[in-house]
Amino acid sequence: MHRRHRNPPSPDVTLYPAPAPYPVTNATAAYAPAPSTNSMAIAALVCSLVLAPLGIVFGHIALSQINRTGEEGRGLAIAGLIIGYIFTAIAVLWFVVFAVFLGALTSAVNESTYYDGDHTYSMATTSLDRAVLR
């Protein structure tokens, strides 16, 4: 058999060692699973925009669950609570203003009079009217 001899490298060529192979690892095992967002916190935020009192209830439940389990979503639950309380306060204030307006309107109608040129008509009820209505 004939042997081949390698020629020695020329003096201007530098030999480098081969790079080390990359370590083989399982990519999924390298990362811990991300903590999940509490679904009640999401429901609290959504419901506070649609039905505010329900958002308040869900927000308190979500905060309780988050404190117990350590899930994500504390900010969502707090936002649902804040929006729910604000929208509920606005709704209550609107109903109060509407009731006062309606009371003032009926009071004004009961005290109003109408004059047709010959007679004066009053919308106010008298004791006789009340007796007849019973």
Image (tube, rainbow, N blue to C red):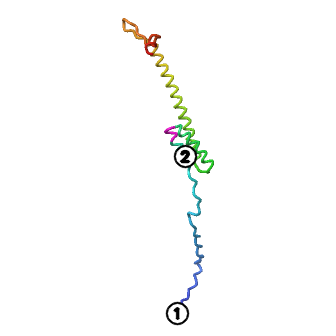
Q: Are marks 1 and 2 in contact (CB under 8 Å)?
A: no
Q: Nearer the viewer, residue 83 or 96?
A: 96
28 lies left or right of 127:
right
The span shown in magenta is 47-51
In the rendered image, residue 120, in percent from the top left (x then y), is placed at: 40, 8
Q: Amino acid at mark 2?
A: Met
- Residue at horizontal 59%, vertical 73%? 20
- Residue at horizontal 58%, vertical 75%? 18
In the rendered image, residue 52, in percent from the top left (x then y), is placed at: 52, 37
In this rendering, is residue 96 above or below 124?
Answer: below
Q: Which residue is mark 1?
A: 2
Disc 1: CA contacts within 10 A as few (<14), some (14-19) or many (>=20): few
Q: Amino acid at mark 1?
A: His
Give the number of the disc on residue 40.
2
Point out the frontmost of discs 1 and 2: 2
In the rendered image, residue 33, in percent from the top left (x then y), is placed at: 57, 58
Q: Nearer the viewer, residue 85 or 61?
A: 61
Does the magenta run of residues contain 130? no
Give the SS element for disc 1.
loop
Earlier sequence position, callout 1 versus callout 2:
1
Q: Nearer the viewer, residue 132 or 34?
A: 132
In this rendering, is residue 102 above or below 46?
Answer: above
